[in-house]
Amino acid sequence: MKVAGKWAYLYRAVDKHGNTIDFSLSPRRNTAAAKRFLGKALNGLKDWETPTVIDTDRAPTYGPALAELKAGGKCPEETKHRQLKDLTTVVEADHGKLKQLSRPVRGFKTLKTAYATIGGFEAMRALRQGQAAAFNLTRDMQGEARLVERAFNVGPGALAEAVQLVNRQLELKAA
């Protein structure tokens, strides 16, 4: 990704089913950035979701980053690390879809705006793919609106109220 005319590195974590776990944007591709990303991705998982295998590309930064996380107790010691080109096709396929969405943007001015925009893309893609269905308890537009509100830190109920207003107007037209 281009940020302020310079390349920034987009780290992405995807499970074996293609569901996005987490992402991070960094101006550098070094061990500290890899450790920060992997720690963030692993921290967001429940104990039963902790991976037994982590597949990465061949960047030399992942090995030392995982070793540091294991030493710090943030990653289980039994977690295997595999660096094979053929194993990252799920990530690359998912990454390509994000590139299609961000191409019309033609770069970002700051890392903060890039991160916020990519976060929005990710939240909307998760909704479209049904990844958030477990959290949409009402299984309707209002439940999706609440999820979007939480993802974007919109005031409580603002979007849900708008959806209710639209629903009322549709009911009036139908009657």
Image: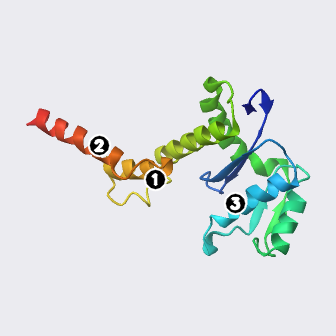
Q: Quadrant of the C terminus?
A: top left
Nearest the viewer among 107 and 78 is 107
Mark 3 secondary-structure assignment: helix
Question: Percent x, y for residue 74?
Answer: 75, 71
Q: Quadrant of the N terminus?
A: top right
Nearest the viewer among 97 and 25 is 25
* Residue at the left extreme of this rendering: 175
Which of the numbered marks, if any, corresponds to residue 40? Answer: 3
Q: Residue at x 74, y 29 (%)?
A: 4
Residue hosting label 1: 150
Mark 2 secondary-structure assignment: helix
Amino acid at pointer 1? Arg
Residue 6 vertical position relative to residue 112 in the rendered view, above or below: above
Mark 1 secondary-structure assignment: helix
Judged left or right of residue 73, residue 22 is: left
Amino acid at pointer 2? Val
Q: Residue at x 73, y 69 (%)?
A: 52
Amino acid at pointer 3? Lys
